[in-house]
Structures are given as structure tokens and as C-alpha cells.
Image (cartoon, rainbow, N blue to C red):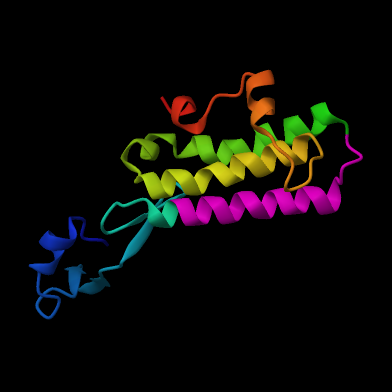
Amino acid sequence: MILLGSQRQLSKIHSDYLDSVLLNGVPIPFADSVKNLGVSMDKLLSGDLWVKQTCQKAFALIHRFYRCAGLWFPTNARRALVNALVLLLLDYGAILHSGLSATNKRKLQPVRNCCMRFIYALRRGEPIAHLYVENDCLQLTIRRQ
């Protein structure tokens, strides 16, 4: 169970009086965050928790790709892996993107950059901006619309 609202609204509620809800005599405590259909939400609906968990999952997947698939997979196979497993994570919560802060939106871009580096077997410092243009890849902000 979670109470949603702005920081100002939530500060008006005294936690001493409202710490849980009784349902059939069983107390259900309030939580600071909940997960619904795989999307984690905090009580402020800021998206911070979802962005953090999505980035962690995506970077873990890419790291696993490097370890298991390596760079000996052909480029089209690496692209298919990224599209099917990593970009899916970003697209799954796309409806949440409209309310994200600029800071959270910037946190998602390195995931996309890491995907491009894996697909084209590039090192960390090599430029990748031209790859977005050459492959007609939409920016995250445009892709979300």
C-alpha cells in the first residue's frame, strides 16, 4: 500500500496516526515504493526508482553480452540482441518518460550509447554520434512519442 502525492502534501499527513490500513483485521503497512507490472514507483511518482533500476538491468545485460557473446558475433546478431532485450526495457516504461525530469532523461542516454558501442564493437572513447544518424536511430525523446 502506498500513499501518492507531492512532498508538500505527504508532509501534511502524520505518520503517527496513519501507519497502516486494516483489511479483514490484518494490518497492511504503507511502503515508500511499490512495483506494479514490473514498473517500480515511489510515493512522489518522480521516476527516479524506475530509471535507476532500468539502467542497472540494461547495463547488466550489456555486460553479460560482452562476457557470453563477445564481439565475435556478427553486427546484425548483436543489434538483434540489443533490440530484443535492452531497448525493450527502455520502451516498456515509455509512458513514464513524459513525466521524467531532465536529469532522469539524461541518465537513460548512456544506456543507449553503450548499446551502440556493443553493436559496432567500439571502445568507450570513440565517437558514436554518426552511428545514430547513419542508422536512422531515433533519440530517446523522439522514440518515446
Q: Left or right of 99: which side holds 145? A: right
The residue under the point 45% across, 40% down is 93
| Vertical arrangement, residue 80 with respect to residue 112, above or below | above
Residue 138 relative to residue 129: left or right: left
What range of the chain is rendered magenta?
Answer: 51-73
Q: Does residue 115 belong to the magenta stretch?
A: no
Q: Which residue sits furthest bottom?
A: 16
| Residue at 35%, 44% in the rendered image | 100
Residue situated in front as seen by the camera: 91 or 112: 112
> Is residue 64 positioned above or below 129 on the image?
below
* Residue 135 visible in the displayed image: no
Which residue appears farthest toward the right when viewing the image?
A: 72
* Vertical order, 8 against 142 (above or below): below
Q: Is residue 65 magenta?
A: yes
Residue 122 seen in render: yes
Total number of numbered labels?
A: 0
Residue nearest the observer in this picture, 26 or 66: 66
Q: Considering the image in quadrants, where does the C terminus appear?
A: top left
Q: For residue 15, which quarter of the picture?
A: bottom left
Give how far across and how far down residue 49 sits, in percent: 42, 57
Q: Main secondary structure of the magenta part?
A: helix
Residue 142 image position (x, y, % from top left): 46, 25
The quarter of the picture where the N terminus appears is bottom left
Write down the quadrant of residue 14 in the picture: bottom left
Name which residue lies at 13% across and 68% down. Answer: 11
Relative to 27, residue 58 above or below = above
28 left or right of 103 in image:
left
